[in-house]
Amino acid sequence: MEAHVTAHARYVIADIDRRLYGSFLEHLGRAVYTGIYEPDHPTADENGMRRDVIDLVRDLDTPICRYPGGNFVSAYNWEDGIGPKEERPTRLDLAWHTSESNHVGIHEFAEWAQAANTEMMLAVNLGSRGLDAARNFVEYVNHPGGSYWSDLRKRNGRADPWNVRLWCLGNEMDGPWQVGHKSAAEYGHLANETAKALRAFDDKLELVVCGSSHSDMVSYPQWEATVLESTYEQVDYISLHMYFENYEKNTSEFLAMPEKLDRYIGTVGGVIDYVKAKRRATNDVRISFDEWNVWYHERKNDAKRMKEWGWPHAPALLEDVYNFEDVLQVGCILNTFIRRSDIVRIACIAQLVNVIAPIMTAPGGAAWKQTIYYPFQFASLYGRGAALRLDVDCPSYDADIANGVDYLDIAGVHDGDAGTLTFFAVNRNGGEPMDITISIEGFGEAKLVEHTLIKHDDLEATNTETNPDAVKPETKRGAFISGGKLVVSAPAHSYSMIRVRL
């Protein structure tokens, strides 16, 4: 099978926002407790944070981390997580039917974020609470001093404000499962008034309003239209979420799902344009795709378990063990975001540690990389710069979700500062290798740097504590550049990263 691709210096989609490779931590399962925070762990730092996890997060170079939820935030009192730990209340978390000790709050998370070399993206509770709690939280986090909340922060040990710029106005408020669920009109009004109050404090904040939880919601895309008509001039982003499932064990259909993702982004982009024109607005609203990942391996089992247990603290929950097939899916999702980087400026893999995550830990034991760690890491490290509009000619197949799905899913990025071109390529064909020829035009002379391949003969192969390297990248030989053309062979069902120096 052959594929022909043209990459031209003048065919540029957009400069990629570095926050396209963001992450997410929620007080859910073991994401926080025994995930990032385990004071008794052999690697724990002075703040009780696991250094082994911090090292793995730093190696991802993920620029932002969304916190503290997720569904959790819609009934969260942020004040519970400040002050002496022994005085913090234990609360029942209605979202995940667990108990929350509040031993990790904004101070602890901020210290972890600094150690992990990531910036905070904070969410406010617009479910059980509202405008007043939101403005107080922002004041506590961002005001230098001389007010009640900022001086309380100082008494709690943090003299300087954290100056968090990016704030989410609630979470998935379209979802009936959400604590404090609201109609689009109700939420739009509350979000607008909250945004106005936060902008009265600091008009340079970046605010994210809730869009649809997924594109199968009955309210989609009218939800986006209604909410944006209420909030358009006050917000910078609208959030979208999507998770990817393969209960039927049909790899071809599974790997076609990014076509649905692309339609989702395109439709909401159209709604944004419509509302902007209708309101005669001059500002731009973009998309924050702040929850995405493969999620199905443990989902149904854990839904049953949650109904049977009491209120455990930090139980193992939604700990999907990712396989090699998921590498291909995550690669395709990231490629879609790169190709849509003109409208998708922020994205957050959900989540970062233990809970549907690229990093796993054992309490008191090791931390290791799941299979999906690698495509996310490669995109984060080398997907910085300008996204290229590639011309692709390759065989395709028809799926239930879309017809004409290209067997080759590919994205290209030009990093002018580093003087490199990077291509991320997934061969969706499980039966044939693919010979890929990429014409490199308008960039000058090119030299091959590396071809890194992720390939396993077993789609179900996983990385575990006892075998953490079952699926890992390898450096391949055989790719070459001749006459301005890059030639690469991609095995059946494989992920490739090819880097070229200009």
Image (cartoon, helix red, strand yellow):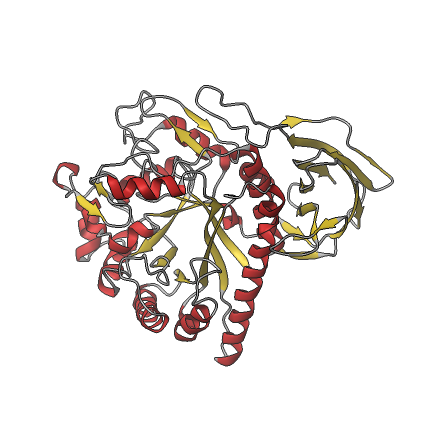
Task: Please say if 174 is above or below 323.
Answer: below
Q: Could you tell me which residue is drawn at 49 percent across and 51 percent down?
A: 347
Task: Please say if 211 is above or below 290.
Answer: below
Quarter placement of the N terminus: top right
Q: Could you tell me which residue is drawn at 74 percent across and 36 percent down?
A: 432
Residue 364, given in percent of the width and then of the height, sits at: 31, 22
Q: Answer whether residue 384 is visible to the viewer in this image.
A: no
| Nearer the observer, 151 or 479 | 479
Left/right of residue 362 with respect to residue 156 in the rendered view: right
Residue 137, given in percent of the width and then of the height, sits at: 25, 55
Task: Please say if 179 is above or below 186.
Answer: above
Q: Quadrant of residue 117?
A: top left
| Nearer the observer, 105 or 211 | 211
Quarter placement of the C terminus: top right
Q: Quadrant of residue 361?
A: top left
Residue 355, given in percent of the width and then of the height, sits at: 39, 38
Residue at the front extreme?
248
